[in-house]
Amino acid sequence: MPRIDPAKTKARATYKHAGTFYALSADPAGGRLYAGSDDAAIHVFDLAAEKKEPVARWTGHENYVSALACVNRGAKRLVVSGSYDRRLIWWDAGNGRPVRSAEAHQGWVRDLAALPDGSRLVSAGDDMLVKVWETDTGRLIRTLEGHAKRTPQGHVTALYVVAVSPDGKYLASGDRIGEVHVWDADTGKLLQRFQVPVLYTYDPRQRKRSIGGVRSLAFSADGKHLAVGGIGQVENVDGLSGPVHIEVWDWRQPQRHLAAGALGHKGMCNQLQFHPDDSWLLGAGGGGDNGFLAFWKTETPPDSSKDRKAPMPVHRIKTDGHIHRFWLNAAKNELYAVGYRKLDVWSLLS
Amino acid sequence: MSKALLGFCGSPEHAINRRLFLQGGVATALGVTAGGLEAFSNRLLAGELRRQQKHVLLLWLAGGSSQLETWDPKPGRPTGGPFRAIPTAVPGIHISELMPKMARLMDRVGVVRSLDTRIGEHGQVAELMHRGRRSEAELVYPDFGAVVAKELGQRDSQVPDYISLYLATEGQSSGRPNPGFLGSRYAAMRLERSLKPENISPPEGLSGQEHTEREHLRQYLSNRFNRERNADEIRGYNSAYGRVRGLMRSDSLFDLEKEPAAVRDRYGRTDFGQHALIARRLIEAGVPMVRVARAWWDSHADNFESHRELVAELDHVMSTLLFDLQERGLLKSTLVITLSEFGRTPIINKDIGRDHFASAWSCSFSGCGIRGGTVHGKTDADGKSVADGKVDAGDVTATIYQAIGINPKKNYYVGPRPVPLVAEGSKPIKTVLA
């Protein structure tokens, strides 16, 4: 696998969009990239095309398309989408037709992930439930319950993100008040829970409302570590004026190994992903200092004997526009980032 | 005003008396208000309006709530955001899905969707929405709460005429009630640091018996003095002392520990819910004007997340309040208003926020004098401008006065100058009036 050099990251192509993309998934084998938008549609791009223009637009949802997962099941290539309309829709990637639809959550579907073999899907919704689905049938296998239904101040909360370990054995979910749960993917047993309270700001005095939450989660390649991201404590909750904040945890202990920002960048980290060789942790988001791509060096194995608070080596790229999701094509050292009114393609050539 | 004139000894036990005098008692006592306005108008305290015991409860959504996430949703439009519109108890009227409880009570609500107030700066527009017009360099207009306090306040009332609960610090000073030329007699009693009024407990070491005896002595001396001179000042002092005594006795109104847990739960254990419960208790006790601020709605980023939090709370608290007032027979005599500085931009910014927007936004009226199940005005398909029925801050103020039986065309006098209650050209919004 080619190594990346964040210092050489270059924007290669941009597609201007009328709205905001909230979701992204790719099927490299099928040569397609799928972006979910606030126009309730899935915009389909040709990965091979130099000029990025949608080649198709799939409609069927009735609200923002907030989550996407591409799954290959034998000869079948599927795309599964989640939406604020509370539904999951299974699409035949070959013809863009809906195959199945399920009323998934009593609340917005916030995130969706597939197990590595594609046999199961995992969704997270604002009913504060994690649900495990059989990909081929759409059958609900299991519902995982445990996240608090209200914030400590008595307000509604949200379950923003779900992640699957690379070996498919573990699931992780993160909520608005900064709580992370790790579940056994086969049994649904809650294996661990820990708090990252810095990610949840409640201003009890000046503005009396909250901001933040666990907005991004990613397992390391070996599944031992879990990266957790969002925005650090925010002084003025009117804006995303707090620092980008990530932590890496040995989730079994549970013990935090490190906490870092992105060179003082103010904003929310909406997605995290370890590079497949675990040499870098990639993050993206946006906020007070506009959008960003960040690369934290993780080559040195985390030292579990101490809690590192010193900044990790980090490379940060300021982008024009808030990024909501990215997809790393490690084989080609490309990164596709979507968000506010555009899709950007970045080259990460070493 | 010198201490000697007021008879203060400067001791701590008189701190509240002095404050209340400065806030309210003195002007009445001397029979003047700032600028010599309408001297002794409060002699008409036995008027019909006061006998009707009407009240106004303002839910002040400080910071600027989004009309698109409350009363004027635009689902499916690029500006609409992710929340759906839901049908209400009134056919044809839809509001945001964040307000399911209010949707069921829509037959008790009059919504105005066509506010165009032009100003998008918090401080200036907070003042505008409270007063209905911009103040002049030499004339500060009173906020409508002060007018309500003046018009509906009972001279012999044992509770304050105007109480404002605003415990968040953001926007507190710019949105602070101001009696303007009506003078401090009609200033709000402000609870800004805690829900317990400060300095209303008898001083430490003074028993209740001693406190009562002191008051009896003061009253005896005042009455004797007044028999000899028949002075309005003394009547005013007695009135003010009466309010202080009433306030000290009504301390329990602010003490929710005495409220059954089920009632507290009903309102929700958020600050706003508990403040609304206090407001209901105050209204039930006879306070004519109560303002409860819920700050801070200024969602320049993450607008939908903050409105999930804030509107869900507003829906619960407001619906509970309306039910509770109705169950106690108070809704028909209490005007409940939701009002803000402005709305939020239809355009969603890069941080999924909405910014300040004064060109086409909404407010609501319920209860006293209101024809429920009505909507006044209309915005265009994307909510970017008023398409029909444009109204402004002056019209809102005129509507409030009309709803509770105050003639908006009435004049006050500042010296010889007649000052109408509302800005020239302002009219009540008839669509929402009973």
Image: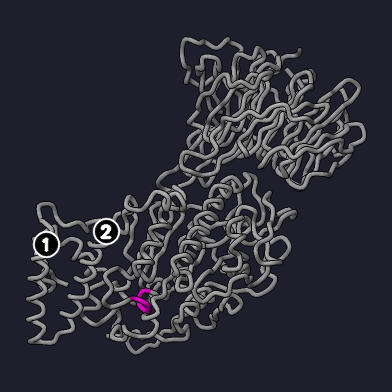
Decide if residue B306 is on the left or right side of residue B185: right
Q: Is residue B324 visible?
A: yes
* Highlighted range, magenta: B149-153
Question: Earlier along the polypeptide chain: callout 2 or callout 1?
Answer: 1
For label 1, the SS is helix
Name the residue at 13% across, 57% down: B12
Q: Is residue B227 above or below residue A112?
A: below
Mark 1 packing: few (<14 Cα in 10 Å), some, or many (20+)? Answer: few
User: Three-letter amino acid code at disc 1?
Assistant: His
Q: Which residue is mark 1?
A: B211
Which secondary structure dominates the residues rendered in magenta?
A: helix
Residue A325 on the magenta segment? no
Q: Which residue is mark 2?
A: B251
Quadrant of image for the N terminus of chain A: top right
User: Three-letter amino acid code at disc 2?
Assistant: Asp
For label 2, the SS is helix
Mark 2 packing: few (<14 Cα in 10 Å), some, or many (20+)? Answer: some
Q: Is residue A207 visible?
A: no
Q: Residue furthest bottom?
A: B416
Residue A159, numbered circle: none
User: How far apart are the alpha carbons under marks 2 and 1?
Assistant: 16 Å
- Chain label for disc 1: B
Q: Is residue A333 above or below residue B25?
A: above
Decide if residue B186 is on the left or right side of residue A252: left
Image location of residue A210, percent across then percent down: 50, 42
Image location of residue A331, percent across then percent down: 79, 18
